[in-house]
Image (cartoon, rainbow, N blue to C red):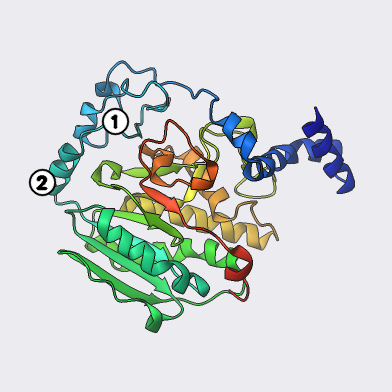
Amino acid sequence: MFTMNWLYSICKRAKFSHKKCLCFLPFLVCVLYFTVSSLRVVIGIIPMEKCTLRSAKMLSMDNLVDATLSLQSRGDVQTCTTWKAPIIWEGMFEAYLYDKAHKRKKSSVAVTVFAVGKYLEAYLETFLYSSEQHFMLGLPVTYYVFTDMPEKVPHIVLGPKRHLKILSVHRHSRWQDISMMRMKTISDIIQTEIRYNFTHVFCFDVDQKFTGRFGSEALGDSVALIHAYYYRLPKSMYTYDRNPNSKAYMETGDFYYHAAVFGGTWKNVKAVTDACYKGIMEDKENNVEALWHDESHLNKYFWLNKPSRLLSPEYCWDDSIGYRTDIRVKRLLWAPKDYENLRTNN
């Protein structure tokens, strides 16, 4: 009761109407969740929905190896969606089967990552070095590094069939614009180059570090990541954009997806980035900006166009959440953030 009264008092001081306050409450509750460790511990024991499929053969598969997934081996988490897409968790899959299948299919992966302003020196070397230890090992991989300081990109020794390409981009005055405008940049490079050379694309935020296998089991037609901070929260607390004037507006959804990682075939990733960029630009024309910028538009896209493969929070975890029994492997970790310093004059 104290928490709700406190939240309502914030709305009152901000001179929000009762209706607007109700719309804003999920956002305020999530702010509390992000800052109070004891609350995150309690959230961690809320049960998830369960997969109702008896066999992985009932999945809508975008890879025949998915038929080998053990959906019932993880009774503590949700392993499939209502539209029969798999949610990939440790203990569900045999890694060698996916590696063998994708080598046979000659799958190849383009990675896009933006290292602009202070983010380049703070994170890029760690991202690239750790990726060489854990990301899609055994498959051809090319990193497309977009930066405003090409001369400062660190030299990393790459493995066989792995390459790095450096591309110059304009440095926007606001970090929000850097985040949102990446959608057009990714679409453009897919159109001009990636589509002719790669089967799949993965798009990453640079402020992350690979710490475990992030392998071919993650490849699919359309791949979305379940956000680590929201996966056990009730849907009423998902911070979708609630502004009906925004193209990202959502009343409800399936999951809350994290824009730090998304991927799929080049054709599907281009469709995602084109749709997000279109929504962002229409919002700009109407003097609107979505609550979580490109991530809000990404969630809207995946609500209307269901992903064929979901990655569990293992694939992008934040240690500040604390210990969770269901996180058996941490495959990618958020790097420590110093936003006040990093985003100054960025």
Residue at image x 40%, y 81%? 152
Asked whether residue 167 appears in the rendered view, the answer is: yes
Q: Quadrant of the N terminus?
A: top right
The answer to whether 14 appears left or right of 192 in the picture is right
Figure quadrant of residue 282: bottom right
Residue 61 x %, y %: 27, 32
Residue at image x 58%, y 67%? 175
Q: Is residue 257 above or below residue 121?
A: above
Mark 2 falls on what kind of element?
A: helix
Residue 84 x %, y %: 36, 27
Residue 240 x %, y %: 61, 42
Residue identifier under label 2: 104
The residue closer to the viewer here, 266 or 26, is 26
Q: Is residue 171 above or below residue 326?
A: below
Crowding near the residue tagged with mark 2, few <14, some 14–19, many ≥20 C-alpha atoms within 10 Å: few
Cα distance in 3D space between marks 1 and 2: 24 Å
Mark 1 falls on what kind of element?
A: loop
Residue at image x 17%, y 46%? 102
The answer to whether 277 appears left or right of 242 in the picture is left
The residue closer to the viewer here, 321 or 86, is 321
The residue closer to the viewer here, 59 or 39, is 39
Residue identifier under label 1: 91
1 vs 2, front mark: 1
